[in-house]
Image (spheres, rainbow, N blue to C red):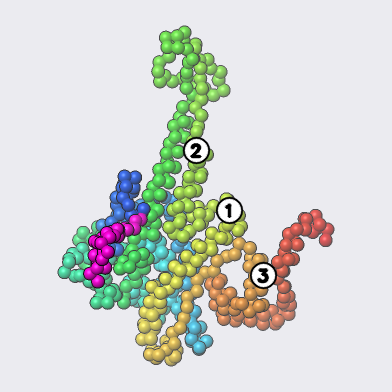
């Protein structure tokens, strides 16, 4: 063992020969090297924790800047509004999955009635907008006696500014700004200011309400392990929004400056040459449809407007594309302009966007809707004779799912043909096909049965039209318009 160790260190071996020392190689990443070229680029990189990086002051600055940009930038307002409308739509619909069909219909009907009374869909859209601008949204489960529904549960929205602990000290190691956690890292208590810090009443009344976690909905995107507060979704795009507006204003200012001068006098004569004297920066009054003469030796030329340049539209397109990327939104949705798209590229871009929306809807269902539904059931159970007996037991089956608005197909005929093929070869179900459209298959079939029954009663004939095959569609597209009219 000792001889091996000596040979490892390069000492002489048993035969007296000196061995070459073993050199330790050190691996290296180019991205980890700091050079004169990248020193400034990585100057702001830090090793802060998720909560330290998202400190109250940092979140406050990001919120204020994001709100300002959305309020003053038409593209920012449109992007945030479109995102909220696409994710929430007209609102989620509850579908109960218990074995009792009567119970399912009753709960679904009553929950829809309650959600319309509290304007749940509108509040969810507001929460999605708040997450994009503020980074997070809070809802307080409270009681509203003025509701005209048996269940008086209500959802009160508060801005992220109000969830804070002004006197937070290091004596609470299990707390961050506005949230206190239990020993397992779960939120146990929220601190909510009674009035918004930007409200004048907050100067008089700075009371903090300490609310239990079960009464507070906290909707944000967790990007890092251990992160407990959110930052605006459009944070990476804030500098880009500013560049977009500055570039647009600069191009407009250049075009206006060029338009302010009708022309410029210039002379080819040398200095002190044969040309009449003209005062520098002198102006000449121009009249409409008049023939003017210039001073001797002087000529007039008109400024050529070079703004906007040919790269103006391309720059705006590229920067908007970069802005929308942090939201998984395609350019044509962000710009509300599909003039540069064809059918295939438009559908391909939307596939990523729709998948992102489905992920957000699932997250919203778990963090907000499931908790709202559980609170609604807890209050409904307390109302004597309101819920069916099957839901009033501890082991009641509460299986359910949330259905959202479907996405309209660009070519309804092709989608109908594909849907018919899937149903024919049993690779899908009616429940799945209706769910893709955001509708309940049982309710739709019952409605269709009523329609067929009424049509039979009135003596109306239902003509079943078989969807055309792809081959027939292609052949029809190839027939010239004249030939089709002749046929």
- What residue occupies the far top of the structure in this picture? 274
Compared with 435, 385 (above or below) is below
Foreground tag (2 vs 1): 1
Badge 2 vs badge 1, beta-carbon distance below 8 Å: no
The tag earlier along the polypeptide, 1 or 3, is 1
Q: Residue at x 47, y 22 (%)?
A: 264
Q: Position of residue 223 (x, y in %)?
A: 36, 64
Badge 2 vs badge 3, beta-carbon distance below 8 Å: no
Task: Considering the whole magenta stretch, tell me its main secondary structure.
Answer: loop
**Range shown magenta:** 1-29
- Label drawn at residue 341: 1
* SS for dot 2: loop
Residue of label 2: 308
Does 377 sit left or right of 436 as displayed? Answer: left
Compared with 448, 195 (above or below) is above
Q: Residues within 10 Å of mark 3 (few under 14, many from 20)?
A: some
Could you say which is closer to the camera, residue 138 or residue 461? 138
- Label drawn at residue 292: none
> Image quarter for residue 221?
bottom left
- Label drawn at residue 417: 3
The tag earlier along the polypeptide, 2 or 3, is 2
Is 11 inside the magenta-drawn segment?
A: yes
Q: Residue at x 27, y 59 (%)?
A: 18
Q: Position of residue 457 (x, y in %)?
A: 70, 82
Q: Position of residue 416 (x, y in %)?
A: 65, 69
Q: Residue at x 46, y 81 (%)?
A: 400
> Image quarter for residue 188?
bottom left
> For the residues marked 2 and 1, what is the alpha-carbon distance in whole angstroms?
23 Å
Could you say which is closer to the camera, residue 344 or residue 147? 344
């Amino acid at each position: 063992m000792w001889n091996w160790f000596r040979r490892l260190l390069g000492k002489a071996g048993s035969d007296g020969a000196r061995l070459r020392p073993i050199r330790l190689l050190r691996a290296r990443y180019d991205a980890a090297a700091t050079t004169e070229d990248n020193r400034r680029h990585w100057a702001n990189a830090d090793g802060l924790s998720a909560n330290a990086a998202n400190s109250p002051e940092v979140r406050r600055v990001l919120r204020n800047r994001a709100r300002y940009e959305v309020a003053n930038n038409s593209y920012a307002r449109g992007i945030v509004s479109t995102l909220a409308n696409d994710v929430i739509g007209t609102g989620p619909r509850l579908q109960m999955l218990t074995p009792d069909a009567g119970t399912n219909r009753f709960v679904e009907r009553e929950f829809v009635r309650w959600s319309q009374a509290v304007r749940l869909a509108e509040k969810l859209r507001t929460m999605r907008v708040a997450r994009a601008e503020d980074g997070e949204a809070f809802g307080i489960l409270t009681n509203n006696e003025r509701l005209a529904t048996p269940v008086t549960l209500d959802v009160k929205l508060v801005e992220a500014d109000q969830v804070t602990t002004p006197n937070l000290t290091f004596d609470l190691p299990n707390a961050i700004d506005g949230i206190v956690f239990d020993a397992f890292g779960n939120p146990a208590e929220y601190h909510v200011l009674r009035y918004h810090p930007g409200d004048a009443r907050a100067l008089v009344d700075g009371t903090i309400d300490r609310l239990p976690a079960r009464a507070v909905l906290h909707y944000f995107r967790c990007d890092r392990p251990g992160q407990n507060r959110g930052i605006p979704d459009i944070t990476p795009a804030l500098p880009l929004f500013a560049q977009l507006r500055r570039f647009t204003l600069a191009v407009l200012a250049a075009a206006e400056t060029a338009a302010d001068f009708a022309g410029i006098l210039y002379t080819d004569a040398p200095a002190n040459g044969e040309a009449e004297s003209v005062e520098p920066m002198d102006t000449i009054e121009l009249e409409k449809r008049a023939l003017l003469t210039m001073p001797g030796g002087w000529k007039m030329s008109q400024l050529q407007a070079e703004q906007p340049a040919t790269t103006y539209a391309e720059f705006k397109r590229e920067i908007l594309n970069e802005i929308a990327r942090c939201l998984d939104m395609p350019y044509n949705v962000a710009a509300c302009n599909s003039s540069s798209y064809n059918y295939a590229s438009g559908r391909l871009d939307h596939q990523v966007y729709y998948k992102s929306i489905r992920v957000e809807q699932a997250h919203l269902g778990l963090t907000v809707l499931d908790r709202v539904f559980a609170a609604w059931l807890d209050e409904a159970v307390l109302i004597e004779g309101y819920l069916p007996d099957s839901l009033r037991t501890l082991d009641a089956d509460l299986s359910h799912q949330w259905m959202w608005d479907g996405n309209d197909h660009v070519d309804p005929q092709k989608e109908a043909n594909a849907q018919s093929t899937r149903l024919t070869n049993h690779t899908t179900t009616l429940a799945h096909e209706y769910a893709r459209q955001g509708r309940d298959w049982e309710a739709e079939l019952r409605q269709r049965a009523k329609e067929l029954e009424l049509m039979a009663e009135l003596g109306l004939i239902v003509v079943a039209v078989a969807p055309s095959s792809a081959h027939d569609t292609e052949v029809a597209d190839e027939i010239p318009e004249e030939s089709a009219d002749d046929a």
